[in-house]
Image: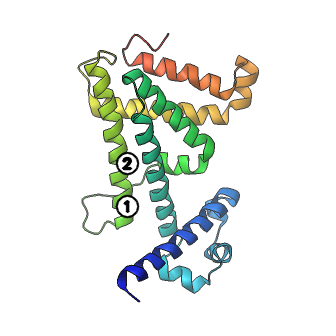
């Protein structure tokens, strides 16, 4: 078998295993799922699983990488929306909310923290991939905020690293809270989850210093 075909086949099997693990983790929780469960769900022997993954930890990292890449692509598409800073930033907020609504489990994976030293020569490639994807998201959001500062819609001078963390943390926290408190929001405020988020997005963008967030 040619090397490229062999690698394509291996990638197919890895993808099947990852998809099976995601289904089980979503339905039962990661802690409750065993390698035997994943093998059964994927239609492979347990021995075959270990050909492609060293264990659940490596599968979990592969899922995190998949989730991060899916999130990055979602945000890239939103950032290409026509218009100025406000329109594109609002599109990004809405895209992240849509991502959470479609797949809250992957949202949690993507928004979580992976602790490792990216400068370590022993760092696994999958963790390096996750880290670099996270950095790409940071650069994308940072570039958008810098554009807003240049347009006078974000307060300047701008401490970009701090602004990105504050913006991203506020946005992710708001979306997760709206999902967890949906019933309370409806009963106490008379708003749907999405109506509440739209108000939150307006307040968040307004807090950046532009004059349009409260309009």
Mark 1 or mark 2, which is nearer the start of the sequence?
A: 1
- Residue at x-position 26% and y-position 27%: 159
Q: 42 or 179, which lies in front? A: 42
Q: Quadrant of the N terminus?
A: bottom left
Place residue 101 in its image quadrant.
top right
- Residue at x-position 45% and y-position 34%: 169
Q: 201 or 58, which lies in front? A: 201
Q: Secondary structure at mark 1?
A: helix
Q: Secondary structure at mark 2?
A: helix
Percent of width and height locating residue 36: 65, 77
Q: Is residue 141 left or right of residue 169?
A: left
Residue pointed to by mark 1:
127
- The answer to whether residue 141 is above or below residue 147 is below
- Residue at x-position 56% and y-position 35%: 97
> Outermost residue toward the bottom?
1
Q: Is residue 21 left or right of residue 125?
A: right
Residue pointed to by mark 2:
134
User: Is the residue under label 1 in contact with that under label 2 (CB below 8 Å)?
Assistant: no
Decide: few, some or many residues near mark 2? Use Cα within 10 Å; few <14, some 14-19, many ≥20.
many
Percent of width and height locating residue 49: 55, 79
State the CA–CA distance, disc 2 to disc 1.
Answer: 11 Å
Percent of width and height locating residue 176: 58, 37
Place residue 30 in its image quadrant.
bottom right
């Amino acid at each position: 078998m040619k090397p490229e075909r062999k690698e394509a086949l291996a990638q197919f099997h890895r993808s099947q295993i990852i998809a099976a693990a995601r289904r089980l983790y979503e339905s039962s929780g990661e802690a409750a799922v065993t390698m035997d469960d994943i093998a059964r769900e994927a239609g492979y022997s347990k021995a075959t699983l270990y050909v492609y993954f060293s264990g659940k930890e490596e599968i979990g990292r592969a899922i995190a990488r998949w989730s991060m890449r899916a999130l990055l692509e979602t945000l890239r598409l939103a950032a290409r929306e026509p218009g100025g800073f406000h329109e594109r930033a609002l599109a990004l907020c809405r895209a992240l909310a849509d991502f959470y609504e479609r797949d809250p489990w992957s949202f949690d994976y993507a928004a979580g923290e992976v602790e490792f030293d990216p400068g370590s020569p022993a760092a696994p490639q999958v963790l390096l991939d996750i880290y670099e994807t996270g950095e790409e998201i940071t650069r994308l959001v940072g570039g958008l905020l810098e554009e807003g500062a240049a347009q006078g819609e974000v307060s300047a001078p701008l401490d970009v690293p701090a602004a990105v963390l504050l913006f991203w943390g506020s946005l992710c926290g708001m979306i997760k809270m709206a999902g967890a408190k949906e019933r309370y929001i409806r009963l106490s405020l008379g708003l749907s989850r999405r109506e509440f988020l739209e108000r939150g997005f307006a307040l968040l963008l307004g807090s950046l210093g532009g004059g349009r967030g409260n309009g």
